[in-house]
Image: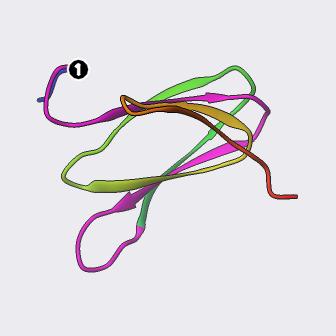
Amino acid sequence: MSTLSGDNDYIVIKAIDDGVSVIGLTRGTDTRFHHTEKLDKGEVMIAQFTEHTSAIKIRGNAKIYTNIAELNSELKK
């Protein structure tokens, strides 16, 4: 089991509005959805890239914090 100081990268997602979708995508020859969460305004999720998760898709208004940058996702207009 990894710790916060381990090799796997973590991201923090904070919902700005209700209904933010966080979707985990698999690694390997076929990229597939393997996990979905819905966050409401103010909720925070800490996610980790693992041997199974190669990408995380975020849909909706949210703040995203990584060890590289802080950024915002936005609703499609």
What's the residue type where badge 1 is placed?
Leu
Secondary element under disc 1, as helix, strand or loop, is loop
Q: Residue at x 74, y 46 (%)?
A: 74
Q: In which quadrant of the rendered view does residue 49 lie? A: top left
Q: Write down the residue under mark 1.
A: 4
> Magenta span has 21?
yes
Please identify the quarter of the rendering in which residue 72 is found. top right
Would you call the spot at circle 1 few (<14 residues within 10 Å), some (14-19), or many (20 or more)? few
Quarter placement of the C terminus: bottom right
66 or 41, nearer to the observer: 66
Q: Is residue 75 left or right of residue 48?
A: right
> Residue at the right extreme?
77
**Residue 73 on image: x %, y %:** 67, 43
Question: 39 above or below 34?
Answer: above
Taking the magenta stretch, the answer to whether it contains residue 61 is no
Q: Residue at x 33, y 63 (%)?
A: 26
Q: Is residue 21 above or below residue 4?
A: below
Seen in the picture, residue 65 relative to 31 is either above or below; the reply is: above
- Residue 29 locus on image (x, y percent): 24, 79
Q: How many numbered dots are placed on residues in this image?
A: 1
Q: Position of residue 42 (x, y in %)?
A: 70, 20
Q: What segment carries the magenta color?
A: 5-32
Q: In this view, which residue lies farthest toward the bottom?
A: 29
For residue 26, side relative to residue 33 (left or right): left
Quadrant of the rendered image containing residue 30: bottom left
Choose between 76 and 25: the one closer to the eye. Answer: 76
Identified at 74% across, 28% down, the residue is 16
Which quarter shows the N terminus? top left
